[in-house]
Image (spheres, grey):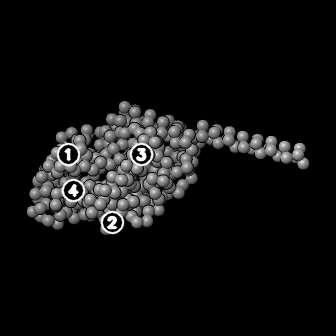
Amino acid sequence: MGQLMRLLNKVVCGLVLLTGLTFVYAEDVYPTKPIKIVVPFPPGGTSDILARTIGQKLSQEWGQQVIVDNRPGAGANIGAEIVAKSAPDGYTLLILSTIHLINPSLYKNLPYDPITDFAPIGMIAETSQVVLVHPSLPVKSIQELIVYAKAHPGEINYSSAGNGSQPHLSAELFKSMTGINIAHIPYKGAPQAITDLIAGQVSLTFATGPSAVPVVRSGQARAIAVTTTKRMAALPDVPTVAESGVVGYESAGWNGLVGPTGMSPAVIEKLSTALTRILKNPEIRKQMIDQGAEPVILTPSQFAVYIRSERIKWAAVVKASGAQID
């Protein structure tokens, strides 16, 4: 019996060793199949643009296909839930953005927790909102907008990327700080919100930089301010809302890369290192800045701290603005 037990112990130890070697080997050669990056918004918006930029470079570097999977709906919650419930093997990732840290203050029963259900990989970029008006609206500055809106209460319609989106909250915060009355028209994503602004169906919108810059440069819409504390490099002549007279106003957004909780630290590190390399690429940096996004490099641990701080920050903004899901 003793000899049999010794033999069984050797077999078990051998299996444990083999399993460990297989696990390390799998991490070492990652990725061995296509990677999917879920974008919880329609094609054409900021998250989609950044995901395709990062995905293309990852594909070139690793020789594996990187698929951008647009899963819009429910205030970006559908795509987030898909990733939160995916296998933590590094092959299903999410473009996390500001809205995912706003949503806990707007929804009573989220199907995921943005803090505990995701493994941070790294920040991609910070973005400003751009206050855009249709050329038919007779205002060329924030102060002119405030004066006109007070003279025509409830008559200005503004579009947003959806209920509870950062553009929506940016506008609601602006309303609360200026005392104006403008009507919210929610859409199912930034592209539709901007399309109807260009068509004149709405007169005003708060749009993320990468979505706004092309229509400003084409003359299809007029930029009267940006929502961050400093001007955008892509639109250097457009003042901030704060310097336009609304002292203390600020609304900055961001996008980052995460996977499901439980991912191997080695895979997270490999993804983080690759992301950092991409964001340091001069060509990519110029491309992103020209589009209105400022590249930001954070380690996974730094990004985790940032995400937690954003949760606290936006809870206060939601409360102060009085924004609600319609």
Of labels 1 and 3, earlier in sequence is 1
Say which of marks 4 and 3 sits in front: 3
Q: Is residue 52 left or right of residue 243?
A: right
Q: Assign a secondary structure to mark 2.
A: loop
Residue type highlighted by circle 2? Ile
Quarter of the figure with the C terminus = bottom left
Q: Any mark on residue 174, and which?
A: 4
Residue 273 visible within the image: yes
Q: Any mark on residue 325, and which?
A: 2
| CA separation in Å, label 2 and label 4 | 17 Å
> Which residue corresponds to mark 1?
240
Residue type highlighted by circle 1? Thr
Residue type highlighted by circle 3? Val
Of 58 and 299, nearer the camera is 299
Of 233 and 88, nearer the camera is 88
Q: Any mark on residue 175, and which?
A: none
Of labels 4 and 3, earlier in sequence is 4
